[in-house]
Image (cartoon, rainbow, N blue to C red):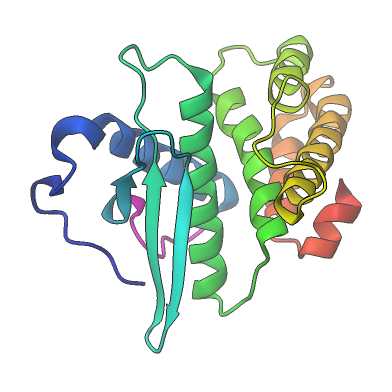
Amino acid sequence: MTARTTTGLEGNGALLVREIALASRIQLGLENLYRLDRAANVDDFVHHAGDGEREGLLVRETDGGLELRLHLPRLDDAGERLDPICQIIEGVSHFVYLADRASREQTTTQLELELQAEVDKYVVLAASVDGFDERTSRRLRERLYERVAYVHAPDTVEGERYRVANDRARRFTGRLEREFIARARYAELRAELRRFFHMSQGDKLRAA
């Protein structure tokens, strides 16, 4: 994988410092949870998403491997709005998943990336809550998977993909809530999340 130069965060200045710091923390948290060896540092690939643009991971295959460029939105002044935070989690999730698969010479699909990112949003936000329990989980799942709006229409390829990923993540995290969180079985919860991460797309869909 090829990184951009990072001298002075050229072209970004101080505007992306908080976003890059958050992205780096998210990468470390996901790698620790899933017990991954680091394939690349996400902060070497971060660029600012243009005004009105959402998070996006740009990928190009080359003879030497993959070239990646991760576009992230700016956080608001208080850093409290959920949407840009979720976009950053999603972008880092895509980056970590793709980098891990590439390091293992494994392929992945866009649906796999979206489904894993939907689960990772739940995982990262849950980890930020003190005393996370069944009630808190239910509220978070409602916010992430039910109170949502889609950019793409349901009859488009992208629209269908995002809706499938959302629905399967909602079902999967609901099962986690019932089987592990409600019973405070957190070691088993982490093991199940690791198992899910390493599944193929078909196994992920069946597990959800």
* Residue that sits furthest to the bottom in the current view: 63
* Residue that appears at 49% across and 74% down: 103
Q: Quadrant of residue 75?
A: top left
Residue 62 part of the magenta-drawn span:
no
Q: Residue furthest left?
A: 8
Which quarter of the figure has residue 63?
bottom left
Magenta stretch encompasses residue 38: yes
Check the image and report above or below for 99 versus 84: below
Question: Percent position (x, y) of residue 124?
Answer: 56, 32
Q: Residue at x 69, y 25 (%)?
A: 144
Is 170 above or below relative to 78? below
Q: Residue at x 76, y 18 (%)?
A: 142
> Which quadrant is home to the C terminus?
top right
In the figure, is residue 119 to the left or right of 207?
left
The x, y position of residue 172, in whole percent, is: 83, 39
Rendering coords of residue 162 (x, y %): 72, 45
Residue 17 position, x and y percent, is 22, 34
Locate the N terminus by quadrant. bottom left
Left of 207 or right of it: where is 166? Answer: left
- Of residue 139 and residue 60, the one placed in the foreground of this image is 60
Magenta stretch: give its range: 36-42
Magenta region, main secondary structure: loop
Q: Quadrant of residue 24?
A: top left
**How many numbered marks does the figure carry?**
0
Residue at (56%, 44%) from the top-left corner? 33
Using the image as rendered, state which of residue 119 and residue 70 is in the foreground. Answer: 70
Judge from the rendering whether residue 44 lies leftward or rightward of residue 141; answer left or right. left
Q: Is residue 2 above or below residue 136?
A: below
